[in-house]
Image: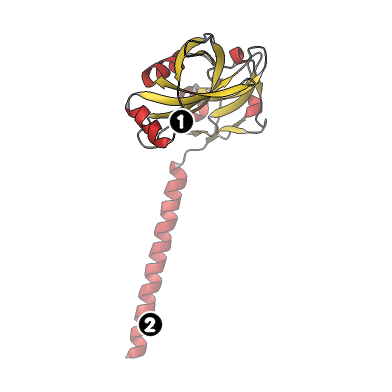
Amino acid sequence: MPASETAALAVAKREPSGSRAARRLRRSGLIPGIVYGGGQDPIPFEVDDRTLRHVLAGAGAVVDLSVDGDPATPVVLKEFTRHAVDGHTVHVDLLRVRLDQAIEATVPLDLLGEESSPGVKEGGILEHVTRELTVEALPNDIPDRIEHDVSDMQIGDTLTLEGLAATAGVKFLDDPELLIATLSPPRLQSEEEEGIEQETELVGEEGASEGDTASGGGGEE
């Protein structure tokens, strides 16, 4: 799914400040951020929280950033920090890019067709191990997400990165042997067997304990 649109984001410069000032900003509905790269000085900025979320939700990889009304510069999202407890946006980092130069990016990976796979229908368990991939592409060619169909996976199958096909202009940078997903046999049978073994061990221990008690009693008499 390649990025197809470029959204515009207008922000205002802010003076670099400490965490207390940043908290005041967030309480007022503004998010602190910084844009850097491109051979220019970093610029701290502030932006309305709702505006930022709206732009990032509807944008492709590239956003046209305007600071204090200056001409727009293409940027990509470098880091989006959320609060560990309440999930609110804490800080945003943007990176200036050139549209004619490839960049690295982290892209979400979605697996499709899980319920249709023969292995899952037979009761197997599909474990999605890797959910993000590192790619290299021109800024406008970076996909919003990568999708892979797993509807033909059987029990015992293992999917690695080399089993995925990259779209035109996109290069995978992770190890080709990176584990993406596995389809394991049903766990119910193994759990039942483990429960039986535990019960057998418990009964054996109780029998041994009773034997020890009986033996000890006979010695005291």
Q: Quadrant of the C terminus?
A: bottom left
- Front residue of 174 and 38: 38
Residue 205 at x, y percent in the picture: 40, 68
Residue 150 at x, y percent in the picture: 54, 24
Residue visible at 61% across and 17% down in the picture: 97
- Front residue of 64 and 22: 22
* Disc assigned to residue 215: 2
- Front residue of 24 and 92: 24
Q: Are marks 2 and 1 in contact (CB under 8 Å)?
A: no
* Vertical arrangement, residue 46 with respect to residue 69, above or below: below
Examine the image and state in which quarter residue 179 appears: top right
Please tell me how crowded label 2 is: few (under 14), some (14-19), or many (20+) other residues with Cα within 10 Å: few
Question: Residue 150: in sight, yes or no?
Answer: no
Mark 1 residue element: strand
Q: Nearer the viewer, mark 2 or mark 1?
A: 1
Residue visible at 44% across and 56% down in the picture: 197
Mark 2 residue element: helix
Residue visible at 47% across and 25% down in the picture: 33
Tell me the distance, in whole angstroms, between the alpha carbons under discs 2 and 1: 67 Å
| Residue occupying the far front of the picture | 15
Q: Quadrant of the N terminus?
A: top right
Q: Label 1, on which residue?
A: 81
| Residue occupying the far bottom of the picture | 221
Q: Which amino acid type is shown beneath numbered disc 2?
A: Ser
Residue 146 at x, y percent in the picture: 55, 20
Please tell me how crowded label 1 is: few (under 14), some (14-19), or many (20+) other residues with Cα within 10 Å: few
Q: N-terminal of the two: label 2 or label 1? A: 1
Question: Residue 83: in sight, yes or no?
Answer: yes
